[in-house]
């Protein structure tokens, strides 16, 4: 190759590179959904064009909706879902989608790892609180908490010994007619993890507070994720830097109803069968969203020592906010904190 040709090729390469610099830069787009997992879902992402973003958003929605239908315990759908298993408790084994088997196997492992703090077979108990909340929200003047007798009676119908999972046959059955599943503590994180795995870099999903940040923003900077103030959830207490990370918070300000000035929330202590009062909120940072979701609920139900040991086991970091406003952190949490 002669020198002139080399020079020409170099110039052409430079021109092409420069053209790339001034070419279309990815823009940020956002989609919001209100009909999956009984919560608000936000997807933000950087894409070359609006249509490229919406193609991605449609795939995410389809995936989330499929999990929402399978893990729903409140609505009947054509194919067997978790409500079918609850409704047919005490009956024959039910053939279910493999994702239901996977979720329930994970739920069983969570029950063991958390010393039964996070127990997806507590459904008979959590249903009483769920119904009390729904009734109180629709008619606040007649708000009431479930009575101790019915809670104790419901607690007799809990425990993984009442759930048969036949992996080989692909069937599930609750052996006790009064037992109920409630996967509220893990299902959103599980579904968010599945979406995380299919998303390209540069996307952020918030599934009712279960946040997954895929990669970084296109300029290489980390995402900034806010941690709500339990006293004023519209305000942020802290902000964390997130890059390929799941951030999940369990808090006593979520899903509440009020009676005689007392707020009752949705995370039930399996010992007292009433809403847990040890913490106001626990935020978990972890590489896996399903684990982050189960840990935030678990740590909410444990003391600091047991919780930090469990977080360490899963290579997760956590921030606890106590009722007196004091904050506790795992050793590595500060490295993520921006403020
Ligand atoms: P999270 O917001 O992830 O902490 O999960 C709370 C949800 O999990 C509640 O709305 C209930 O559906 C369910 N739940 C409440 N208490 C428990 C518990 N001790 N074990 C398992 N699930 C629970
Ligand atoms: Mg959870």
Image: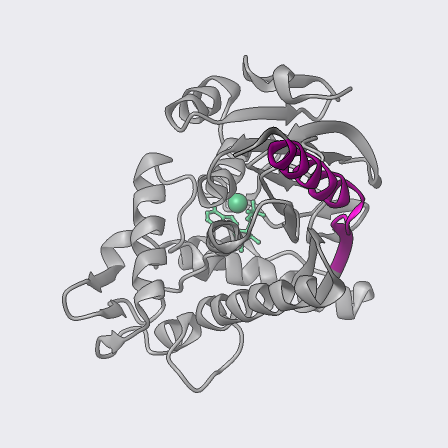
The answer to which quarter of the image holds residue 86 is bottom left
Q: Is residue 16 magenta?
A: yes
Viewer-closest of 280 and 53: 53
Which residue is located at x 66 percent, y 47 percent?
Answer: 209
Locate residue 328, reporting x and y percent. Answer: 62, 17
Is residue 12 depicted above or below 320 in this figure?
A: below
Q: Position of residue 287 (x, y in %)?
A: 48, 35
311 is higher (above) or lower (below) than 296: above
Q: What segment carries the magenta color?
A: 4-30
Residue 274 sits above or below residue 224 on the image: below
Measured along the vertical axis of the image, is residue 179 above or below residue 246?
A: below
Residue 41 x/y as whole percent: 68, 59
Asked whether 115 or 2 is in front, the reply is 2
Residue positioned 35% across, 64% down in the render: 99
Who is closer to the viewer here, 260 or 207? 207
| Residue 146 visible in this rendered orientation of the protein | yes
Point out the residue furthest to the top here.
331
Q: Residue at x 58, y 58 (%)?
A: 129
Q: Position of residue 22 (x, y in %)?
A: 81, 44
Looking at this rendering, what residue extends furthest in the left direction? 168
Quadrant into which the C terminus falls: top right
């Amino acid at each position: 190759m002669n020198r002139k040709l080399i020079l020409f090729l170099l110039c052409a390469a430079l021109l092409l590179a420069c053209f790339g610099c001034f070419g279309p830069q990815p823009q940020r787009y956002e989609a919001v959904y209100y009909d999956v997992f009984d919560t608000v879902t936000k997807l933000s992402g950087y894409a070359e064009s609006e249509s490229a973003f919406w193609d991605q958003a449609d795939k995410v929605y389809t995936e989330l909706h499929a999990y929402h239908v399978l893990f729903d315990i409140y609505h009947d759908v054509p194919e067997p879902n978790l409500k079918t298993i609850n409704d047919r408790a005490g009956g024959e084994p039910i053939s279910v989608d493999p994702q239901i088997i996977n979720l329930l196997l994970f739920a069983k492992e969570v029950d063991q790892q958390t010393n039964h703090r996070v127990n997806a077979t507590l459904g008979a108990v959590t249903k009483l609180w769920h119904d009390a909340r729904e009734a109180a929200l629709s008619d606040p003047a007649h708000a009431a908490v479930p009575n101790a007798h019915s809670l104790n009676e419901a607690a007799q119908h809990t425990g993984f010994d009442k759930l048969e999972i036949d992996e080989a046959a692909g069937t599930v059955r609750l052996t006790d007619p009064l037992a109920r599943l409630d996967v509220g503590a893990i299902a959103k994180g599980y579904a968010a993890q599945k979406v995380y795995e299919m998303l390209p870099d540069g996307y952020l999903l918030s599934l009712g507070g279960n946040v997954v940040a895929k990669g970084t923003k296109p300029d290489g900077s980390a995402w900034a994720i806010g941690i709500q103030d339990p006293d004023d959830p519209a305000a942020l207490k802290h902000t964390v830097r997130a890059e390929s990370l799941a951030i999940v918070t369990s808090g006593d300000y979520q899903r509440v109803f009020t009676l005689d000035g007392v707020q009752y929330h949705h995370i039930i202590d399996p010992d007292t069968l009433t809403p847990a009062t040890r913490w106001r909120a626990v935020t978990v940072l972890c590489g896996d969203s399903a684990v982050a979701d189960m840990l935030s609920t678990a740590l909410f139900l444990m003391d600091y020592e047991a919780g930090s040991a469990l977080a360490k086991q899963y290579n997760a970091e956590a921030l606890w906010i106590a009722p007196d406003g004091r904050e506790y952190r795992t050793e590595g949490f500060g490295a993520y904190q921006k403020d």
